[in-house]
Amino acid sequence: MKKIEAIKITRAVTELVRRASFFLRGDVLSALRKSYAVEKNKQAKTILKAILDNAAYARKHNLAICQDTGLPVVFIQIGQDVMIRGDLKAAINKGIDEGYRRYYLRNSIVGHPLKRGAPGFSPCIMHTDIVKGNKIKLTLLPKGFGCENKSQLKMFKPTASIEEIEEFVIKAVKEAGHDACPPYVIGVGIGGTADYAGLMAKKALLRKIAPGSSDLEKDLLKRINKTGIGPMGLGGMNTALAVHIQTHPTHIAGLPVSVNISCHALRSASVTL
C-alpha cells in the first residue's frame, strides 16, 4: 500500500495551475499551427497568428493565456492500492487556491449559484475514478465559461440515426457561433445517463489532438469547418481543430448526447504521483 501525504497533492495541484494557465498544450499548439498553414482567408490567418503569438507571449512571460482563468475542473484517478494521509478534497482545493493567488489569476467562482457573492478561487469541480495500481493521476482543466455556456444536452429516442446526432452537434456549434472564441475543440459524449454523457463530453476535451480519429469524428470536423464561422467567428476554413467523441453503454429506452465546446485556449495539465 503506497501512502501519499495530502500536502504533496496540494503542491502538485498548485503547479498544475501554473502549467495549465501559462502553457498551452503542445497538441493544441500543433493543431493551431496546422490551421494557420492551411487557412486561405486573410483575416482568419491574421487571427490565428495573433492566437499563436498570444500563446507564445504567455509562455515566455508566465502570464495567463486568457483573461477568463476558468472554473478549475480536476479529474482524479486514484489507484486502489493508494492510501491518502489527509483530506483529499481539502488538499486539492487548497492547491487551487494557492495556485490562483500565487500566479495572480482572476478569481471567478461565486459561492452560491443564485445568491452569487464576491468571487473567489475555489472550491473547484472534482471527478474521481478508482483505477488499478498505486498511483494518483491529477488532471486540471480550467474551463472558461464563454465556451462552457454553450454546452448542450439532448435525450434522443433510441431509434435516432447517426445523421440526427450529427445535426445536433453541428447545430450546437452554429449556435455557439463566434461567442465561444473559435477555433474550437468539441467534446461529445454519447450514451450512459444525462449526467454521464455531459462528463464524457468534458473528458473528451482531454484527449490529445492527433490523426486517427473515427469516421464520425472526421465527418463532423469536416462539416463543422464548412460552416464558415472561422477563427473568432469572422469567417474562414478553421472553425474547429478537432471533434472528440466518447461513448458508453446506455439504457434500451434512451440515447443521451452531450456537447461540450472548448475555445481555442484549451488548457489542461496532468501529473502522476
Image (tube, helix red, strand yellow):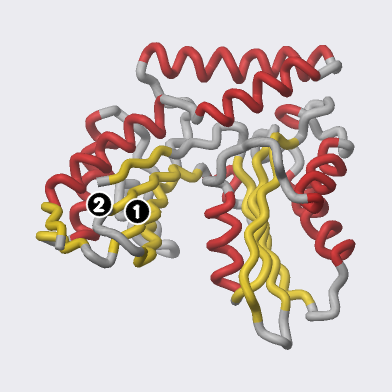
Which three-letter amino acid code belongs to the residue tagged 1?
Answer: Cys
Q: Nearer the viewer, residue 122 or 184?
A: 184
Q: Nearer the viewer, residue 54 or 78?
A: 78
Q: Residue furthest bottom?
A: 253
Q: Residue at position x 35%, y 67% from top?
A: 130
Q: Is residue 56 left or right of residue 225?
A: left
Q: Quadrant of residue 43?
A: top right
Q: Is residue 225 above or below residue 6?
A: above
Asked if residue 218 shows in the view, the reply is yes
Which three-letter amino acid code belongs to the residue tagged 2?
Answer: Ile
Mark closer to the chain start, 2 or 1: 2
Q: Nearer the viewer, residue 118 or 104?
A: 104
Asked if residue 150 shows in the view, the reply is no
Q: Are discs 2 and 1 less than 8 Å apart at CB?
A: yes
Label disc, if present, on residue 92 of the rendered structure: 2
> Residue 76 appears at what percent x and percent y?
35, 56
| Mark 2: secondary structure | helix
Q: Is residue 40 left or right of residue 23?
A: right
Density class for disc 1 (Cα within 10 Å; few <14, some 14-19, many ≥20) is some
Q: Residue at position x 28%, y 28% from top?
A: 103
Label disc, if present, on residue 124 of the rendered structure: 1
Q: Residue at position x 58%, y 52% from top?
A: 204
Q: Is residue 238 left or right of residue 68?
A: right
